[in-house]
Amino acid sequence: MAEGVKHDYHLVNPSPWPLVGSVAATVMAIGAVVWMKGALGLEKGNSIVFWAGLAGVLYTMFGWWRDVVKESRQGDHTPVVSIGLRYGMVLFIASEVMFFVAWFWMFFEMALFNEFRTLSAIEEVRTAWATWPPHGVHTVPAWELPLVNTLTLLLSGTTVTWAHHALQVGDRKGAKIALALTIALGVLFTAVQAYEYYHIFSHDYFYSEEAANATLYGSTFIMATGFHGFHVLVGTLFLIVCLLRLMAGHFTPQKHFGFEAAAWYWHFVDVVWLFLFAFIYVIFGGAAH
């Protein structure tokens, strides 16, 4: 804690990151519009503005989190501040849960109530929603690559728990080994999902001229599983930073919230995937048409 401070709270020093991050995020959003639609006198497909904004966002993330790590090392993260950090992480994960609820809701709404759309007076609508998944859609076999990824994430949940326990009892070597294994499993998951997506797109699994709503199935599937894959990628980067900090001697058995937050996030990713696998791949995935 800073010298002369008589309270348990941490008053953050003036920081440029909120402003820099806001500007960078705005530039990235405008760049995305330019890239997809064209604007600002630039042609559609021009991505330079987007990448410039993304570079600014990544720079902000690196600089801001570096300052938070420095604050932790300087003793500014008192017990009261640590409680606030934990509440913040819990609320962040809760917001992510609701994010995935939206994708599940979309998928369930189409899977559970498709028969009601067959009551439409429009023949094309009745035909399109006669079956779920839509006729002509080739679904992804649940017991092949998705099962491999399920086992991969379940194993990674075990190794990250091992790393946490090892750190708590002062076994830094064991913590490093377990954390490295977790990262390797995260990379494996991403590689398997990338191969699965390549297979889906190269064989036109979700495209069918026979059903008008075939692309709706593909859109909800890709949004749900794709955003989860993005979260796995973010979680893997989170764990890599924790491993680097662990190797630098930052964590102690008594003080390692940075790693705890990463472990919580990773368990959240694991649980979401179990729901995705159970409902989107197995229960509502349906048989191939």
Image: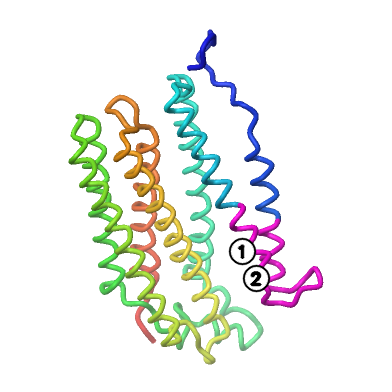
Q: Quadrant of the C terminus?
A: bottom left
Residue 245: within the magenta? no
Residue, x 54% and y 42% (percent of image)? 63
**Which residue has dot 1 on it?**
51
Is the stretch drawn in magenta largely helix, strand or loop? helix
**Which residue has dot 2 on it?**
47
Residue, x 32% and y 63% (percent of image)? 189
Q: Nearer the viewer, residue 66 or 99?
A: 66
| Secondary structure under the numbered disc 2 in the rendered image | loop
Residue 155 appears at what percent x and percent y?
23, 54
Q: Determine crowd level at label 1: few under 14, some 14-19, many 20+ residues with C-alpha closer than 10 A.
A: some
On screen, 66 above or below 122?
A: above
Residue 54 appears at what percent x and percent y?
60, 58
Q: Which residues are magenta?
A: 27-56
| Secondary structure under the numbered disc 1 in the rendered image | helix
On screen, 74 above or below 152?
A: above
The image's colour scheme reads rainbow
Q: Determine crowd level at label 2: few under 14, some 14-19, many 20+ residues with C-alpha closer than 10 A.
A: some
On screen, 175 above or below 186?
A: above
Residue, x 53% and y 18% (percent of image)? 9
Q: Nearer the viewer, residue 45 or 265?
A: 45
Q: Are marks 1 and 2 in contact (CB under 8 Å)?
A: yes
Residue, x 43% and y 60% (percent of image)? 228
Q: Residue furthest bottom?
A: 209
Of the residues shown, which amino acid type is indicated by label 2?
Ser
Of the residues shown, which amino acid type is indicated by label 1?
Trp
